[in-house]
Image (spheres, rainbow, N blue to C red):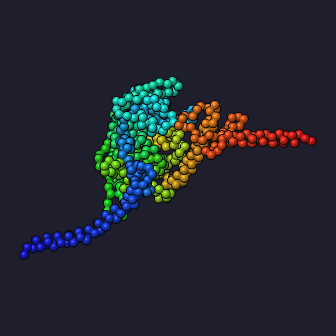
Amino acid sequence: MNIRRTTAHVLLIGLTGLLLLELPGAIASRVDGNRWFDPVTDVHAIIMDDYVKNANREAMQIAVIEAMVESLDDQYSQYIPPQLESDFNKELSGDYRGIGSRISTRPGQAYKTKSLEILTPMRGSPSLQAGIRPGDLILEIDGWPTVGHTDQECIDRLMGPPKSKVTVHVKHDDDTEEDIVITRDRILTKSVSGLLTTEEDWRYMLDDGTAFIRIESFTDRTVQELEFLLQKLERQGPIKGLIIDLRNNPGGSLEAATQITDLFLDEGEIVSIRSPREDKQDPGTTFEAKYPSRWESIPLIILLNNNSASASEIVAGALSDHGRAQVIGERSFGKGSVQELRPLEGGNGLLKMTTKYYYLPSGRHIQKAKRVSEEPWGVDPSRGCVVPETPKENQDRVLARRPFETIGGKYTQAPDVVEEEWILENLKDPALGEAIVLMRQRVGEGSWPELPEDEDAAFDPMAVGLENLLEQREFLETRMTEIQDDINRLEGLAVEPDRGLDLPEDMALSQPVIAIYDDEGELVGRWKVGENDDLSRTLSAVELERIDQSSTEEDLTEEASQP
């Protein structure tokens, strides 16, 4: 008897039996999955057969996908349709084709509609070479007016293939206007900057040993930019301390975050990513420091605020957990979810979907709960290093910094040794001022100063968050009042064009409005005439009411004069 053949035969029977047992379950699972699509298929068929108009099948398909993603109740999961794929990839890589300028918007003089304003052209960019300067207003793009259009609509018209030309009609700060022809090119945005710009480059050194570096986002080139910069600064002299500003940094590439952390960490865990789902048998992935670096012992300070998110939280959290950096500012945003990009077959777009969460070396979960919760999230400042910032203070700091980062205009100077007082007066930046003081103590004494145990006992991130939200609500309420005032004025101009400039054609009102002004010309009320109202009869009624009111006043005057 052949024992080997008998054993194999028994094993084959066993496997076949197991397969036969599992096959009905697999078939049932597939059938259940197919049944899920039954109502969707039925609705599609009914619409295509009997809807009164020709339905847009592509629009329906996109709507179904977007609805499924929206049902996840996750603000970070997103469907990117094919027509938006290129824009999404540009944002991730920092690589696009255009004129190379940073833009802002400011109210127009007549109607407070947006005018495209140049904050600054980028160094070496086509726009700088063509003569664009900070503060320029772009009024037209190839004859197309920018006033009344969104930023993105204007940006789309400025972008184009390399070597193609675009003509912009520009108004300069001195009110002169001219047409400027710009030859578009490939633009590689830089994510690393310094304290202020000079004619040649950024200024990074605060004194003869402390460097300040701001990282705006984490792109595929951020690590290379940072390494090159640190090497350049070292050739000028030893770096005794480094302040890295990650405030308002929205994050970006996970690989860039882990590699930058590795520059300053000799060993140990950087971050782990894993799914909290119990039904997933996935141990996750842990990223550890593994590459030697000459900057693994340099004193570090990280600046954070509540707009520092994702990759910036990984860098700050890992360096803080390992005791490599002091964190100054306020608790970070709390964006600790991992999104994976899944291309859909047939070129039908991308699905960006949350699949895992970030965990810091301490085991702390970065992700902030969507609903109000007392569970910790994000990265906290180091003990004694809390510098809260209200939304208004954040805005003031960003605006104060702008004159110091423009290229091609007047360059603002700073003293050779930048002190806290200069930072507070010129940059409105208490956190950076405190960082300078703390770093100089560290460089001078060789260790971080000891702080009392109860230094931050009164600090409550929830209370600070509540205060910021209340201030934000007040700001929005004020802005809504201003918008309503603009609406009132525009509707008044629509019925009394001699009181101001004519409205653009695309802003014409579909219904007439009666505006009421006092003796000083101030608008005191308005009334919009409905489609079914008889305007002539309404005006007559208003006139009669005015006459009646006048008669009443005369009668009262006569009665008062009688004995």
Q: Position of residue 306 (x, y in %)?
A: 48, 48
Q: Position of residue 547 (x, y in %)?
A: 77, 39
Q: Position of residue 302 (x, y in %)?
A: 43, 45
**Nearer to me, 265 or 517:** 517
Find residue 550 and report its image quarter.
top right
**Nearer to me, 370 or 324:** 370
Q: Is residue 385 at all visible to an observer of this figure?
A: no
Which residue is at a point 45% across and 25% down the rendered structure image? 179
Q: Quadrant of the N terminus?
A: bottom left
**Nearer to me, 561 or 301:** 561
Which residue is at a point 42% across and 55% down the rendered structure image? 50
Q: Is residue 495 at all visible to an observer of this figure?
A: yes
Find residue 505 and report its image quarter.
top right
Q: Count up the numbered dots.
A: 0
Q: Which residue is outermost to the right?
A: 563
Q: Which residue is outermost to the left?
A: 1
Q: Position of residue 455 (x, y in %)?
A: 51, 52
Vertical side of 380 occupied by 419: above or below: above
Q: Is residue 184 left or right of residue 384?
A: left
Vertical side of 557 occupied by 172: above or below: above
Which residue is at a point 45% across and 36% down the rendered structure image? 154
Q: Quadrant of the C terminus?
A: top right
